[in-house]
């Protein structure tokens, strides 16, 4: 047995190998024993058969002796020659001169009628003595048979003599017959007969004894072999079990597991490690796990180089920004998104002014440093989802998405971003200790969907950029002159607004809020722009722009400050000291990081009672992080400031939010109030809002109440606070104060 482990040197394999060998040997032994056992069982049959054979030969000898006696006696008594013929035939068969009929024993001669046909077919001519010799008798047994045979042959002499006596001619025939009969029946005959039968009987006994002994021994032996066989079977079972265990140990797990893991490796799925018991690390499964680990490492390596290749192929090595290839891909994506969402997008070309001069005077290294800093500023200037790319030299390109559903909105949003970017690029740079100043020109083109090819868009933005350069650099130009005009106009208003803020051109109007008894309890503060040329401008004309440009933050602060100053001024004055003021907050203002601090500072600075201040929020606020909004509201509420949810019913509020928001009032939007009496839907909505407010324990107020009928209906459904032209339009302070001092408002109707 040359162990396989000589090659691998591993104990688990050695064990398996030995087990396999033992199993093979045991199996061979088992099979050999089985054959041996079958033969032992056969030996019993053989012994039995030999026994029958031996007894058969003895019985034939006795039978033939009896047949001879019968034939001779019948012949002597009847003189019929046929019996003599039978007699001779019996002798001839016995001595092997005539063929021996098959199954010659037993009653063969009794079956023959007259001289009729023989009952059984003829076999070979074999002397009985030869058969006996062949029958493996012991010497003693054979001697007995031979003795019987010899005695039988001897008696044949007497019988032949009796037959001769009858056949002789002359003399007294009857007397001769009588003498012959007497010869075949006398005591001597019987004695002679007995000399035949006695050895036969003795033979039978000896054979009986020997053969039963042989059968018993064979049977005993068979039983023994059977036990050994069963034992070896058990042993084989044991070695098979040992082999199985050795195999399990070598494999390290079930065959199914191995199969599954190999399949996984084949699929290239090697992220999840193959579980192997610590003791089975040197098993097939353990080796699989090791293979998997190595494949995983190779895979990681592969991924890393793929990432490197990707980086080289798609990114600018100097700035780390996407290169032209990736830019075009992003542009294509943005076009698709724009197509799907219906939102405008923009492509921006940015070119540094006089970059060549820096390169020529301070060297390319300095140029590279500047480009890197420009790249950083550009990247920080836009939303992470937008693309900033460098397509060569000092040329940068941007793709901005989600700019709004109208070209006007998109243009002003783009303008705002572009201006911001250009401003950021004019900030001083520090290049290796040198302070450097730079600027850039920017060209933009807007697009909606995939109507214009990317190539065309690139040309458009490029063209716009050259127009910006022509305009004297450090400027923004749009490809579309109409957009240019829009942007210009908005830019003008924005400048105007900025100036208005500086010059305090805004005024507050106050619109009374009353209860069912028409008592004036509070007012909403509404801003107006007192424009030097355009006159009084309503908030609808500039709030949106202020929101877009970010001016809403300083404007909102001004409104709050003015309102708080008014509250402080009224404090303690009879008829005015109890008034509350509601101030509108735009979402953008509310989300400004300094909002809470600003409000608290204004309240403290003016000395207004925060409990007289209510901030009106709209549902548009709730599209953003609600938890943060709630936190802001709670902080301010902690200082006594209240909140009203304005324009309720038009926005996004879900009931869940409504329940969570720490509100002090719901304000039914004026659109429902306006149509409530003509439109069953609006009436139902108004009712529902009131019911909802009641269930949330929130006071409710209706705005835009213009008629008495509207007020009555509102009162009927449970709304007991009102604001609207029915009581008063928003009015300047000098008109409002007398109204407040009167206490009760006469409805205008
Ligand atoms: P709003 O907050 O819904 O204010 C109510 C608007 O409805 C006011 O328009 C008011 O004049 C008008 N109104 C009041 N009663 C009636 C009525 O019976 N019938 C009709 N048809 N209208 C009535 P206004 O003053 O033009 O303000 C428009 C919007 O501008 C305000 O809507 C508010 O969203 C915004 N706004 C006004 N002032 C400010 C402010 O200081 N800050 C901010 N962020 N937004 C403001
Ligand atoms: Ca309002
Ligand atoms: Ca409103």
Image: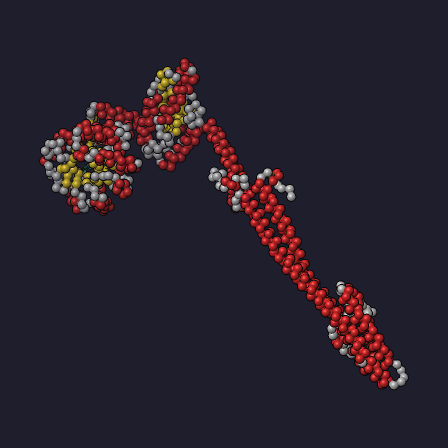
Q: As displayed, is residue 384 above or below residue 658?
A: above
In this view, the residue in front, 129 or 549, is: 129
| Residue 57 falls left or right of residue 700 | right
- Looking at the picture, how far across and down is residue 490, in whole percent? 28, 27
Residue 120 visible from this viewpoint: no
Give the number of marks.
0
Residue at (20, 26) in percent of width and height: 505
In this view, the residue in front, 311 or 16, is: 16
- Which image quadrant: the C terminus? top left
Display coloring: secondary structure
- Looking at the picture, how far across and down is residue 406, in whole percent? 32, 33
- Looking at the picture, how far across and down is residue 573, in whole percent? 10, 32
Residue 606 visible from this viewpoint: yes
Residue at (64, 52) in percent of width and height: 29
| Residue 141 falls left or right of residue 344 | right
- Looking at the picture, how far across and down is residue 371, in whole percent? 40, 21
> Hey, which residue is sitting farthest top in the picture?
361
Q: On the image, which quarter does residue 441 sit in?
A: top left
Q: As displayed, is residue 570 above or below residue 157?
A: above
In this view, the residue in front, 127 or 578, is: 127
Q: On the image, which quarter does residue 542 sit in?
A: top left
| Residue 601 falls left or right of residue 98 | left
| Residue 276 falls left or right of residue 126 | left
Q: As displayed, is residue 509 above or below residue 503?
A: below
In this view, the residue in front, 589 or 303, is: 303
- Which image quadrant: the N terminus? top right
Q: On the image, which quarter does residue 53 sit in?
A: bottom right
């Amino acid at each position: 047995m040359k162990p396989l482990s000589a090659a691998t040197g591993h104990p688990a394999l050695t064990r398996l190998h030995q087990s396999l060998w033992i199993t093979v040997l045991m199996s061979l032994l088992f099979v050999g024993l089985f054959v041996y056992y079958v033969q032992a069982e056969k030996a019993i049959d053989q012994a039995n058969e030999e026994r029958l054979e031996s007894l058969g030969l003895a019985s034939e000898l006795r039978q033939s002796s009896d047949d001879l006696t019968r034939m001779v006696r019948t012949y002597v008594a009847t003189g019929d020659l046929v019996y003599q013929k039978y007699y001779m035939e019996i002798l001839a068969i016995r001595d092997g001169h005539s063929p021996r009929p098959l199954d010659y024993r037993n009653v063969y001669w009794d079956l023959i009628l007259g001289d009729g046909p023989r009952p059984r077919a003829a076999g070979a001519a074999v002397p009985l003595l030869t058969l006996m010799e062949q029958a493996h008798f012991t010497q003693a047994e054979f001697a007995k048979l031979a003795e019987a045979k010899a005695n039988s042959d001897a008696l044949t002499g007497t019988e032949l003599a009796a037959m001769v006596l009858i056949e002789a001619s002359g003399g007294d025939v009857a007397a001769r017959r009588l003498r012959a009969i007497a010869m075949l029946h006398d005591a001597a005959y019987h004695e002679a007969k007995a000399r035949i039968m006695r050895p036969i009987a003795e033979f039978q006994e000896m054979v009986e004894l020997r053969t039963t002994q042989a059968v018993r021994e064979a049977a005993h032996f068979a039983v023994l072999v059977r036990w050994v066989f069963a034992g070896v079977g058990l042993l084989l079972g044991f070695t098979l079990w040992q082999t199985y265990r050795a195999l399990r140990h070598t494999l390290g797990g079930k065959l199914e597991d191995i199969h599954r893991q190999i399949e996984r490796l084949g699929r290239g799925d090697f992220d999840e490690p193959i579980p192997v018991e610590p003791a089975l690390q040197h098993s097939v499964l353990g080796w699989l796990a090791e293979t998997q680990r190595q494949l995983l490492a190779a895979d990681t390596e592969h991924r890393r180089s793929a990432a490197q290749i990707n980086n080289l192929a798609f990114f600018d090595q100097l700035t780390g920004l996407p290169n032209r290839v990736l830019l075009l891909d992003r542009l294509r994506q943005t076009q698709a998104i724009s197509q799907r969402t219906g939102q405008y997008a923009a492509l921006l070309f940015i070119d540094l002014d006089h970059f060549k001069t820096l390169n020529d005077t301070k060297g390319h290294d300095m140029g590279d440093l500047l480009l890197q800093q420009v790249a950083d500023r550009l990247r920080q200037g836009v939303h992470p989802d937008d693309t900033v790319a460098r397509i060569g030299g000092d040329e940068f390109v941007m793709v901005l998405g989600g700019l709004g559903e109208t070209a006007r909105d998109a243009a002003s949003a783009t303008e705002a971003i572009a201006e911001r970017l250009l401003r950021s690029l004019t900030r001083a740079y520090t290049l290796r200790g040198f302070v450097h100043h730079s600027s850039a020109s920017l060209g933009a083109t807007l697009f909606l969907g995939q109507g214009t090819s990317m190539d065309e868009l690139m040309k458009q933005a490029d063209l716009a950029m050259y127009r910006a350069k022509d305009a004297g650099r450090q400027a923004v130009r749009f490809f579309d002159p109409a957009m240019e005009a829009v942007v210009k106009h908005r830019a003008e208003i924005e400048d105007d607004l900025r100036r208005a803020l500086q010059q305090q051109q805004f005024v507050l109007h106050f619109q009374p809020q009353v209860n069912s008894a028409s008592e004036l309890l509070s007012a909403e503060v509404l801003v107006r722009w007192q424009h030097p040329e355009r006159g009084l401008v309503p908030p609808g004309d500039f709030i949106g722009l202020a929101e877009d440009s970010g001016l809403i933050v300083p404007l909102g602060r001004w409104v709050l400050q003015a309102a708080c100053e008014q509250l402080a001024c009224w404090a303690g004055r009879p008829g005015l000291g109890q008034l509350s003021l509601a101030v509108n907050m735009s979402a953008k203002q509310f989300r400004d990081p300094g909002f809470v601090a600003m409000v608290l500072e204004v309240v403290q600075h003016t000395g207004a009672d925060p409990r007289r201040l209510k901030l009106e929020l709209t549902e548009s606020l709730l599209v953003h992080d609600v938890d943060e909004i709630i936190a802001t509201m709670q902080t301010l509420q902690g200082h006594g400031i209240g909140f009203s949810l304005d324009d309720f019913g038009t926005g996004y509020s879900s009931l869940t939010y409504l329940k969570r928001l720490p509100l002090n009032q719901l304000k039914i939007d004026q659109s429902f109030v306006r149509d409530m009496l003509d439109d069953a839907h609006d009436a139902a909505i108004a009712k529902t809002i009131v019911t909802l407010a009641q269930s949330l324990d929130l006071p409710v107020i209706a705005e835009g109440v213009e008629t008495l009928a509207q007020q009555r209906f509102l009162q009927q459904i449970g709304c007991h606070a009102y604001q609207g032209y029915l009581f008063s339009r928003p009015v300047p302070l000098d008109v409002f104060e007398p109204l407040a001092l009167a206490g009760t408002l006469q409805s205008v109707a």
